[in-house]
Image (tube, grey):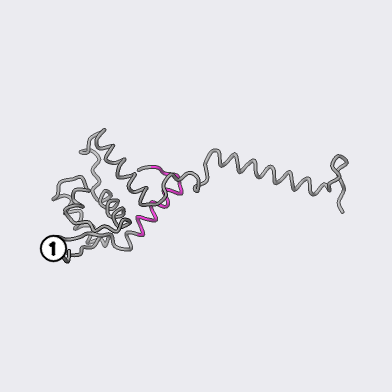
Amino acid sequence: MGRESPSSGKPDGMIEELADEVIARIKTRARDAIVPPATTSAPFGSNAELARALIRLRRHRDRQLGSDLFADPAWDMLLDLFVNADAQRDISASSLCIAAAVPSTTALRYITMMEKRGMVARRKDPLDNRRVFIFLTPEWHAKVDRLLTSWTVEGVQAA
């Protein structure tokens, strides 16, 4: 056995190990106090909740600062489609235009661009041939989900 400490009767090696463990715990607690671990810092239970919060914050910003300076229709539509996919709700093109918070012609132009890029797809309403539903493609749903997850892990609260 190793040498024993006269005050404790424990081998010196054990004391060093305990000291190292205490120092490691202190460093971890100090780091966590500055940057809390992701599991405790995220206030959202799901990415859909984060997306809903982002939508609310964007509308609040528009009310406070004006919407004419901050239009981002593609992002607004992606968030709306993501939230509604989570709730398993079909979104009509006209409803998505409203969610974009821009004139309908602008929103429809964005929907067309997003469709060409494979971000969204259209599906006719089987009950009403005049209506078209828009939905995120699986690839883009996963991309938005990964982005929101990365923000949650990083502790981002809003964008």
Left or right of residue 131, residue 39 in this image: right
Q: Give the residue drawn at x 17%, y 66%.
A: 126
- Quarter placement of the N terminus: bottom right
- Between 42 and 13, the one lying in front of the other is 42
Furthest residue toward bottom:
126
The residue lying toward the viewer, choosing from 145 and 87, is: 87
Which residues are drawn in magenta? Answer: 142-157
**Residue 124's quadrant in the figure?**
bottom left
Q: Quadrant of residue 109?
A: bottom left
Tell me residue 150's x, y (percent): 42, 51
Which residue, given by chain and number where applicable, does mark 1 sit on?
128
Which residue is drawn at the image coordinates 54% and 38% (left, top)?
A: 34
Q: How crowded is mark 1: few (under 14 residues within 10 Å), some or many (20 or more)?
A: few
User: Given the image, on which type of amino acid does mark 1 rest?
Assistant: Asp
Task: Considering the whole magenta stretch, tell me its main secondary structure.
Answer: helix
**Secondary structure of residue under mark 1:** strand
Front residue (pair 113, 147): 147
Q: Which residue is drawn at 77% across and 46% down?
A: 16
Q: Position of residue 61 (x, y in %)?
A: 28, 37
Residue 2 falls inside the magenta stretch: no
Quarter containing the C terminus: top left
- Residue 85 in the image: x percent, y percent? 30, 57
| Residue drawn at the location 20% of the way across and 64% of the way down | 123
